[in-house]
Amino acid sequence: MEAPFVAKSWDGVTGPIFAGYGSTEMPWLVATYLCVLIAVILGWRHERHAYKAASTHPM
C-alpha cells in the first residue's frame, strides 16, 4: 500500500490521509462485510435456538 505523498517526516504532509489508499481497499471492505454478515446470521440462529429451548422447557 503506497502513501499518497512523498515526505520523510510528518512536517511535509498536508491534506487528508486515507488509511485505505491503494488497490486493496475494496477486497478488505468486502471481507469485513462478509464477516459481519456471517456473525449476524450465526447469532440469529443461536438466539432462535436458545429461544425455542427456553420456551419449551420452562423453569
Image (cartoon, grey):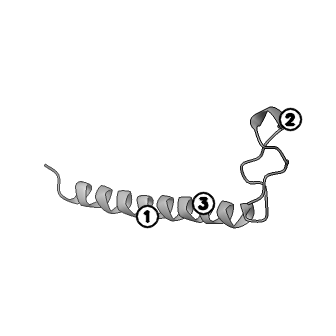
**Quadrant position of residue 53:** bottom left
Determine whether, in the image, residue 13 is placed left or right of residue 43: right
- Which of the two labelled residues, at mark 1 and mark 2, occupies the earlier sequence position? 2
Report crowding for label 2: few under 14, some 14 to 19, many 20 or more residues within 10 A (C-alpha).
few
> What residue is rendered at 73% in x and 65% in y?
24
**Quadrant position of residue 14:** top right
Disc number for residue 32: 3
Single out the residue that lies furthest toward the top. 11
The residue that mark 2 highlights is 14
Front residue of this view, candidates 2 and 28: 2
> What residue is rendered at 50% in x and 58% in y?
40
Q: Are marks 3 and 2 in contact (CB under 8 Å)?
A: no
Percent position of residue 3, x then y:
79, 52
Locate the N terminus and report the quarter of the image it occupies: bottom right
Is residue 32 shown above or below 5?
Answer: below
At mark 2, the secondary structure is loop
Q: Are marks 1 and 3 in contact (CB under 8 Å)?
A: no
Discs 1/2, front: 2
- Which of the two labelled residues, at mark 1 and mark 3, occupies the earlier sequence position? 3
Give the residue type that dot 1 points to: Leu
Front residue of this view, candidates 50 and 1: 1
**Quadrant position of residue 34:** bottom right
Give the residue type that dot 2 points to: Thr
> What residue is rendered at 61% in x and 65% in y?
31
The residue that mark 1 highlights is 42
Determine whether, in the image, residue 5 is placed left or right of residue 55: right
